[in-house]
Image (tube, rainbow, N blue to C red):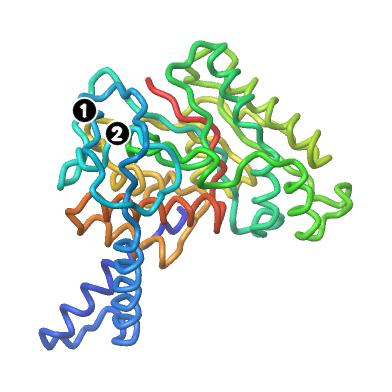
Amino acid sequence: MKTRIPVIAGLLLTSYVLSSCGSSQSILDAQATTIVADVFTRLTAEARAITPTPYDTPFPTSTSVPTSIPAPTQTPTAMPGRLVFPIQSLSESIPWLPWDQNVQPGVMYIGFGLTQPPFDNVLVRKAFTAAIDREAIAVLAERLEWVDVRPATSFLHPEVLARDLYNDVGIPFNPEQAREYLAQAGYSDATTFPSTTMVISIAGQPATGFYLQMADLLANMWRQHLKITVNVEDIGTLGQYYHYLETHDPQLFRISFITTEQGGNDPDSVYRYGFYTKLNVSNFTDFTFDALIEQASSITDPILRHSLYIQVERLVCEEHVVISPLIHYSK
């Protein structure tokens, strides 16, 4: 069984409380406590420096949240992406959006194995991500009757985050930049790139043949733009597939999941499910990520929470490139 992400920030704060009560069993040392306090202070300052722009024209949304925007009273600082509905309409609680029985936001992405070459190199992960044409994948999904499909360069569904960050956060499609990333990683000659396999399961797919067609389309993109051959392997049933992901370290793998009523329509539940459970196939662990998630869950102001989650999106999809988002959709 793989070791999953510890909730570092929570442990450090617990250590602080125990030590202040005179406990002789300190969980972590005082220096680590000081570090997390400093990080929280810095992140809060960064969040307060960002305010959402009320000038955006809202997209129609299938949720029950109104999309009217109050008249601006001051010149705001621009935020990335496009407004889906006003942040002011988000609740000061978790979840911050009501559950809509008619809409279940979903995300599909490619994950990377971070622990072994060649995908332990972030430049390789950036190269593979920049070589993906999400709009072509979205067209395929629409042709096979997927619902409310949007190309995605970020993790959170727009109707969970309240903004669509496509091409503003994450790594956009850019074949030339992809080849440059690959050369910087030491693979100017693509023939020296190690043998690569992407694992999938075609079981449970909502449209006949989609997962296999999607995998073939991705493999063709990597072959065309990077001159790298990626083999596609179908593991079997969903049970067999997820057992394989949990017990192996795949190079590339496909994940898709739907936000559930039990989890709540909120970034906190989506991120915790995706990166603090067995779905964290990449074994991603990062102190700043943990601190951002813990801080955002302790804040009631949706404007500050919103800005923190945008920082998380940049961390996951731009800086570390843990995943390559493909599409957002609804069930």
Assign a secondary structure to mark 2: loop
State which quadrant residue 10 falls in. bottom left
Figure check: 12 above or below 57: below
Which residue is nearer to you in this view: 319 or 280? 319
Locate the C terminus by quadrant.
Answer: top left
User: What residue is at 59 percent from the left and 19 percent from the top?
Assistant: 139
User: What residue is at 57 percent from the left and 39 percent from the top?
Assistant: 110
Q: Position of residue 250 (x, y in %)?
A: 61, 45
- Dot 1 and dot 2 residues touching (CB under 8 Å): yes
Question: On the picture, is 62 further left or further right than 281?
Answer: left
Which residue is nearer to you in this view: 79 or 160? 79
Real-space CA distance between mark 1 and mark 2, rounded to the nearest whole angstrom: 7 Å
State which quadrant residue 54 falls in. top left
Q: Position of residue 232 (x, y in %)?
A: 69, 31
Q: Residues within 10 Å of mark 2 (few under 14, many from 20)?
A: many
Please give the count of numbered marks on the rendered protein: 2
Figure check: 198 above or below 276: above
Label number found at residue 310:
none
Question: On the picture, is 6 further left or further right than 19?
Answer: right
Amino acid type of disc 1? Pro
Label number found at residue 66:
1
Q: Residues within 10 Å of mark 1 (few under 14, many from 20)?
A: few
Question: On the picture, is 45 further left or further right than 118?
Answer: left
Mark closest to the chain's N terminus, 1 or 2? 1
Label number found at residue 85:
2
User: What residue is at 29 percent from the left and 66 percent from the top?
Assistant: 44
User: What residue is at 24 percent from the left and 83 percent from the top?
Assistant: 26
Amino acid type of disc 2? Phe
